[in-house]
Structure formats: structure tokens, C-alpha cells
Amino acid sequence: MVYINEIPDHSGKQITLKGWVYNIRTSKKLIFIIVRDGTGLCQSVVAQDDVPENVWDSASRLQQESALEISGLVHADERSIGGHELHVRDIRIVSIADEYPITPKEHGVEFLMEHRHLWLRSRKQWAAMRVRNTIIFAIHRFFQERGFIQMDAPIFTGNAAEGTTNLFETDYFDRKAYLTQSGQLYGEAMAMAHGKIYTFGPTFRAEKSKTRRHLTEFWMIEPEMAYYDLAMNMDLAEEMISFIVQEVLKINHEELVILERDIGKLEQVRAPFPRISYTEAVEKLNSPKMQEKLDTMARDRELEAEKLKDELAALDAEFGQAKKGRKFQIDRKRGEINARLDQIDEDLRNLPVWKKSALEKKWGEDFGGSDETLLTMDDTTPVMVHGYPAEVKAFYMKRDPENNEIALGVDMLAPEGYGEIIGGGQREDSLDILLQRLKEHNLPEEQFRWYLDLRKYGSVPHSGFGLGLERTVAWLCGLQHVRETIPFPRMMGRLYP
RNA sequence: UCCUCCGUAGCUCAAUGGCAGAGCAUUCGGCUGUUAACCGAAGGGUUACUGGUUCGAAUCCAGUCGGGGGAGCCA
């Protein structure tokens, strides 16, 4: 048995593939079967004159996604996907598929999500999952090569009090337990045992957010390092992201092409990334230059919409006389243009809000999604924003020794509008200050007894951050929505399949 | 929770108050190199649901349900 990605090594030889029918085309005496086996696609040609009658009959019975073992000779042929094709000698049907719901035509989001278990077989989804795999493995390699120990934080937790986000509540032997929203506090305990650790696991947020950046269940990577300050923390985050991007470019070129990703943009992602303070970011948002940029953006959108409408009118005029094949292309193009026009409409409706948010941003307020997009607009690499107002940040963040109003936190914002992929910072290491913060945040000291112990027994400066896996995958794949970056996304209103 | 857009054949969509339609998919027929193959034919409908306006509703109005995008919140 040979896998499709090994075919170039078997040119001119007889091989057997085991897989599924991705697509099939028939004519009088020829059948073209596109076979997929999980490693790639291969066109297999059955010629009636070259095979026994039973093989021809088998080929005639195949439907999309039928399972088969197929044998033949490998021929180099430029007309085929991947440059090689199989001249079939024999076919063994493993199972004939029922009528397959996902045809090689277009489908809507709702339909595809309802068939996610089958959608995973489609080419773009296949490519995205392989990039996800590369990213996961790259993260492990990055940390393992630097002496980090991978450890797991618990998924059930007893305290619902850590932050403001809503948690999923479960029944835990007649007591309440919550699904974790972060492994960080436990990460701190583990870092005090091993120096440098990272967790890699699922986290849960019961927020009712329906946006392209949110899931209720997502995977987070949280390194935590003893004796690291904020600057070292930022160095590490930057080095890690650069490494991941380089690995994806090296390993997944084919997948990025399938995903129609602008590879040039990814090639520009190299350290160092710009670092700006929160205060500088607010100034940037308030600046006349930002106002100009937003005005230009609005004008550009309007011009683009006009151009697209003209294009649409031209296509409409052509449609009546067009041949069938051309009608397909026109339909597809119209779909793309209409989707873009909807997006422009939405942008134009939102622009005044974005403008207001940016220009009237006051020191002390947190950034919204639009502010993040505006901050990264000029950059091809991620941007790190550090030194947030302490008031909007969590109780465990260490304050800047030179300015008590500022917390030593950092967010990394991905370019191209993908938003926050990393959030982290230096942790408060003083027991007295932490006790005071718990009081200020009205948090129950009893629940955090173990956490406070870490400051009692050999407290040291330490830092860490959380990387959102799905947002990273979305950014590197150029996907519009995080739902396509995880095999079975969990979102508000989606628990099936 | 709020704002906004949408719901028509298995799928993607058209029909903007006047006979419910096309392509794909399915079935049948044709075609020796197809690239979402192509050509011909057939079957396929409670227009999400409930009520209202109207001579007449897929279309207008109200409510309900489901979905997309966004705000808040965040990775």
C-alpha cells in the first residue's frame, strides 16, 4: 500500500492506493476517479479497453465518497493534480457511499456546520487542519527545545471568582464545579516547581459572543516562567510566534496555496515586532493621522463598492447570452461580489462607531476589536501593546514600580485584523499586595489560599502568557472565522455534531 | 442582553403584490483525456411557523423559531 503523497517515488511502478472517491467523471469508455486518502488527491483513469469487465463495472458503480482499493501504474502526467496519475488495472470496492450531501459546488455556512463531520474531508478544511497540526507541533518543539516542561492544569475548578467572564457550571457530586477559563494560576504553581512550564489544553468561556473570533471551547497554550520579567516575557512571545510562522511556511506551502493564503504577507512576519505602550497606543488612536486614515478608509470602501456594482451590472448583462459553463463562473463571481458588498456595507455602518471609539478613547479604557485592527493597520508583523491601566486588568497582575496606575501586562495583536492572539504579563509576587488586591476585587481569600501560599514560600518575580490556538490558526491560514480552525467547534447555539 | 441582515426543491440561488423558476445533486440516455467535464430528458415545493392586510401574499404588517455578522467580553 502506497500513500498519495509518496506517489512521485513510484513513477512507472505498479501500486495500490486505499482511499475514497473525492470526485468522479464518466464518459463512454473512460472513467476519471479523483481518489483521496488523507495525504492528498490523485486522478485515476479507468479505460474500458484496458480492464476486465468486472473492474469496469465496479468503477461504474462508484459514487462520491465511496471507499475503494485501487491498483495501477503510476504515470507522470502534467494534466493531473500533483503531476502524476494512476492508470487503473484493478478496483476493489470497500463500501459504496450513499448520496453524499457535500457536492463539489457551493454551500452555505449553516449547512456545512451541520455536516462538519463530513466537511472535514473537503480540501480547504483538510489544509487548515494540517496547518493546525504544524502549529501545535511547532509550539511543543519550541518549548521543549528551551527546557520547558509541559504540565496540565485541571479542567474542573472550584472557584468561579477569578474574573468577570461567565463560566460553565457543572454538577460535581452535588457540589458546583466550573470548567476552567484559564490554567494560569495553576501554571504559576507548576513554574515554582519546575522553573519553566507550559500548559496546552482546552478552556471554556460561557460568553454569549457570536463573532468570527469567539468559541465557547478553545485551546490555549500558557507558558509560565519563574524569574522572568515583562521584557523577557515579551522576548519569548515574539520568538515563539516567529518560530511558528517559519515552521508553517517551511512545512505547509501546499496547504497555504490550497487555502489561497497570501504567503508574501506571512514571509514578512519576522522579529522584532513593534512594542508600544498602552499610553502611546491611546495617543495613536486619538491622533489626527488616525482620523485621516479612517476617512481615507471610508472613501476607499465607497469607491470599491461603486466599482463592484458596475462589475455586477456587466455580469448581469452578460448572463442572459452566456453558455452554461460561463454561467457557473458568473454565478460564483456574483456570489463573491455580493459577499464583499455586504462586508463593505457593514464596514461603512461601523466606521463612525470605530472612529468615535478611536478618537474619543480615554486613558483608562480598554481597547475594542476595532481599536486593535486600527493599531495594527500599518504593520505586517504582530504588534505588542504593554503597560495597561491597572484598573481594567486582573487582580494578579503586577503594577509598574514606577507608576502604580499601570499593570505590567502585554497583549499581542495579530496583523490583518485578526486581533488579540496573546494576553499575558508579569504576576504580582508580593503576598501583602495580593491580599490587598483580593479585597479590592471582592474575591474570597479562602478560595485562593493555595495561590497565596506561592507568595509565602519562596516568592519570586515571574511572568507568563496565554496564546489562543484557534486565532493563531485563523491568522496563519487566512481564514475568516475561527470555526474552521478546530475540528468540531463549540459555539453559542452549536453543540452538534 | 442590544443592534443589524437573512430564511423559497437535497444544495446554491432567482422570482419585489398577479401561473413557483434555474443550475448543481438524483434517475435514465449520449459522449475516448475530463479538470466544479459536457449534451439531452425525467422526477423533485406546506416559499421556517402562526396570525393579519388584500380580489389576490414567497413578496406587505405583527409575533414566534432558526441562522449569519457586529457591540459588550475576551484568546
Image (tube, coloured by chain):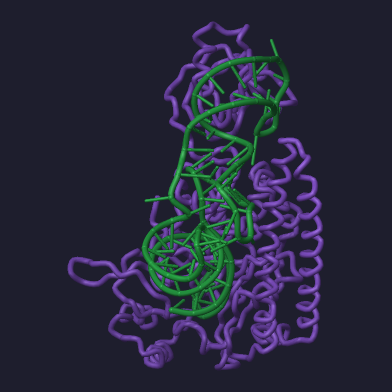
Q: Quadrant of residue A157?
A: bottom left
Q: Residue at x 32, y 77 (%)?
A: A450
Q: Residue at x 58, y 30 (%)?
A: A23
Instruction: Please say if A312 is above or below A368.
Output: above
Residue A56: image location, x then y, percent: 54, 12
Chain B drawing hue:
green
Vertical placement of residue B1 versus B54, above or below: below
Q: Is residue A71 left or right of residue A314?
A: left
Q: Position of residue A265 (x, y in %)?
A: 74, 57
On the image, which quarter does residue A366 sit in? bottom right
Q: Position of residue A317 (x, y in %)?
A: 79, 49
Residue A457 visible in the snapshot:
no
Can you tell which quarter of the image residue A286 is in? Answer: bottom right
Position of A404 relative to A451 (above/below): below
Picture colour for chain A: purple
Residue located at (65% from left, 70% from top): A346
Q: Residue at x 63, y 91 (%)?
A: A362
